[in-house]
Image (cartoon, rainbow, N blue to C red):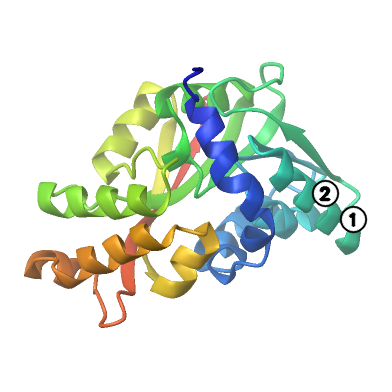
């Protein structure tokens, strides 16, 4: 029997759910998305890579503001949805490309901007993916990485990673702020800013989007019901199992 790879797991999780991510309110809006658009608007001639584009929301927001956007994702089904939606919106400067973060099929210094939102926690090797992002970025270019972040404290971290993987078996890790800063530094980036926010997640919508199997949905409800007080307090767990996660946006650059 052939053992499935992590890439297979990601494809299996996300390909049947592409439409759900296109229509997801959590992914289609947010202060982090507006922050990315503001950064892009300062570079109207830029070639931009949307790395791990998912439902394409970063690409859709920034395509009207820049010269060209490449929406890049491991899932062909996601890319088909993105291409169809881009055509509906008349975004003729948006193209798609399939592949994994750790092996970008682009020449060195191909892009003025690299943007990545809610993707890094799925990468099998985050360090390699970040090094690849830096490789394809032009000298003096800017990259923006946005993701859920771990609180860092052991109890809170264990709870977060557990609920993430119960919901989505392709989850690898929500990195802490400290881990992110180390990963970015090791990849050769200089951090310009870090913006921290909170993301409220409605439980039923959260599991429905991923089509989490019912036994695992029940396990998730049990996890929220028995969570100790420090966990309940930090993640603001509600009676219906809804909760809030920490997020961060890292704006970095590649030295000229």
- Observer-nearest residue: 3 or 65? 3
Q: Residues within 10 Å of mark 2 (few under 14, many from 20)?
A: many
Image spot of residue 56 (x, y percent)? 69, 52
Residue 141, percent across and down? 61, 33
> Decide: marks 2, 1 in contact (CB < 8 A)?
yes
SS at mark 2?
A: helix
Tag 1, which secondary structure?
helix
Query: Above or below — where is 196 with respect to 110?
Result: below
In this orientation, does residue 103 appear?
Answer: yes
Whole-percent x and y of residue 215?
Answer: 35, 60
Circle 1: is it few (<14), some (14-19), or many (20+) Cα within 10 Å? few
- Which residue is identified by label 1? 87
Q: Which residue is mark 2?
A: 83
Where is the C terminus found, in terms of image quarters? top right
Q: Tell me if 232 is positioned left or right of 163 in this view.
A: left
Q: Is residue 58 above or below residue 236?
A: above
Residue drawn where x is 76% and y is 51% of the image: 82
Frontmost residue, 87 versus 203: 203
Name the residue at 72% across, 24% down. Answer: 110
Taking the image as shown, residue 26 lies to the left or right of residue 186, namely right
What residue occupies the far front of the structure in this picture? 1
Please state if 47 lies on the left or on the right of 182 as rendered.
right
**Residue at the spot 35% in from the left edge and 47% down from the top edge:** 165
**Residue 97 sits above or below residue 117 on the image:** above
């Amino acid at each position: 029997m052939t053992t499935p790879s992590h890439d297979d797991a990601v494809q299996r999780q996300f390909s049947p759910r592409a439409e759900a991510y296109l229509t997801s309110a959590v992914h289609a809006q947010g202060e982090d998305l507006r922050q990315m658009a503001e950064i892009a608007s300062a570079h109207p001639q830029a070639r931009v890579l949307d790395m791990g584009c998912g439902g394409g929301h970063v690409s859709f927001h920034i395509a009207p503001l820049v010269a060209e956007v490449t929406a890049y994702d491991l899932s062909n089904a996601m890319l088909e949805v993105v291409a169809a939606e881009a055509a509906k919106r008349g975004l003729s400067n948006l193209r798609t490309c399939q592949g994994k973060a750790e092996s970008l099929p682009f020449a060195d210094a191909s892009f003025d901007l690299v943007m990545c939102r809610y993707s890094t926690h799925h990468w099998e090797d985050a360090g390699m993916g970040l090094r690849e992002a830096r490789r394809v970025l032009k000298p003096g270019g800017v990259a923006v990485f946005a993701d859920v972040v771990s609180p860092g404290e052991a109890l809170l971290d264990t709870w977060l990673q557990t609920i993430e993987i119960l919901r989505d078996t392709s989850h690898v890790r929500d990195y802490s702020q400290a881990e992110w800063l180390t990963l970015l530094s090791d990849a050769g980036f200089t951090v310009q800013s870090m913006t921290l926010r909170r993301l409220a997640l409605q439980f039923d919508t959260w599991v429905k989007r991923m089509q989490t199997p019912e036994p695992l949905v029940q396990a998730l409800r049990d996890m929220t019901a028995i969570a100790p007080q420090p966990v309940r307090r930090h993640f603001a767990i509600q009676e219906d199992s809804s909760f809030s996660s920490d997020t961060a946006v890292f704006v970095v650059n590649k030295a000229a």
